[in-house]
Amino acid sequence: MQIPAILIAPEELFEVFGFPVTNSFLLTLVLSICLIVLFFFAFRKRKIVPDSFQNFFEWALESLLSYVDGITGDREKTLKIFPLSAIVFIFILLANLLEIFPGLGIFKFLRSPSSDLNFTLTLAIFSMVFVHILAIKDLGFSTYIKKYINLKNPILFFVGFLEGLAEITRTFSLAIRLFGNLLAGEILLMVVSFMIAYLFPLPFLGLEIFVGFIQALIFSSLIVIFYVVTSEKPEE
């Protein structure tokens, strides 16, 4: 049996009203629905004395909240950015863990969302837009825009230009880092599984679980850091 063709671009499965549905988009949709259902049942009937299911979710979210608090150093800022950083962390982590799902990369209809640049770039753009919207609310538009457009002198104008360029670079960096690491991991698991299909891939599966967790943590942490930096008042 030959190793399946390794493709960077996702494969189109079918079309819905002219919109192409790819294998990675299909898993993204399934994962989104599963998350909505999971959180709905976890917090549908919250109890003063939580059961094990509710207790696990509360522990996970409280741990994430404390972690974000440690980055921002400001509970008010934490509460603003936490909803985005928490859901991004959970979503990316689960998307990354799909890599170890049996048959992923072998069957055409299965591909991890994180190994699709369209997914990671969309997530990065949405996150950065959200960060800048929060920064505008915190600073006010006139103060916010001075970070990027300052006509007082040529030096400040050039510094503002570099700041704007840095925001674009950060967005692409977020997307490409996640995409590159997960695509490489998916290819590695596919090749190793075909070469030696039993016990040998197990260490690589463990490594991919660790990498998937770290990449989700890095992505969500950088969003928080970018928000803290972007919401700081520009120096005169």
Image: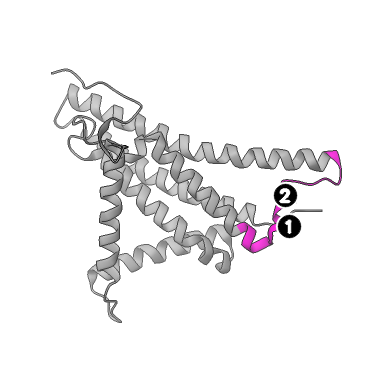
Where is residue 8 drawn, in percent x and y? Answer: 35, 26
Q: Residue at x 30, y 27 (%)?
A: 187
Q: Which mark is residue 152?
A: none
**Marks 1 and 2, how far apart in space?**
7 Å
Instruction: Report if residue 115 lies within the magenta region.
Output: no
Where is residue 58 drawn, in percent x and y? Answer: 34, 68
Secondary structure under tag 1 reads helix
Instruction: Tell me which segment is drawn in magenta.
Output: 135-154
* Above-or-below relation of 106 to 67: above
Which amino acid does the dot numbered 2 rest on?
Lys
Where is residue 15 drawn, in percent x and y? Answer: 27, 37
Q: State the image quarter where residue 171 is shown.
A: top right
Residue 149 or residue 87, whichever sits in front: 149
Q: How is the image coloured?
A: one colour
Q: Which mark is residue 147?
A: 2
Which amino acid does the dot numbered 1 rest on?
Thr
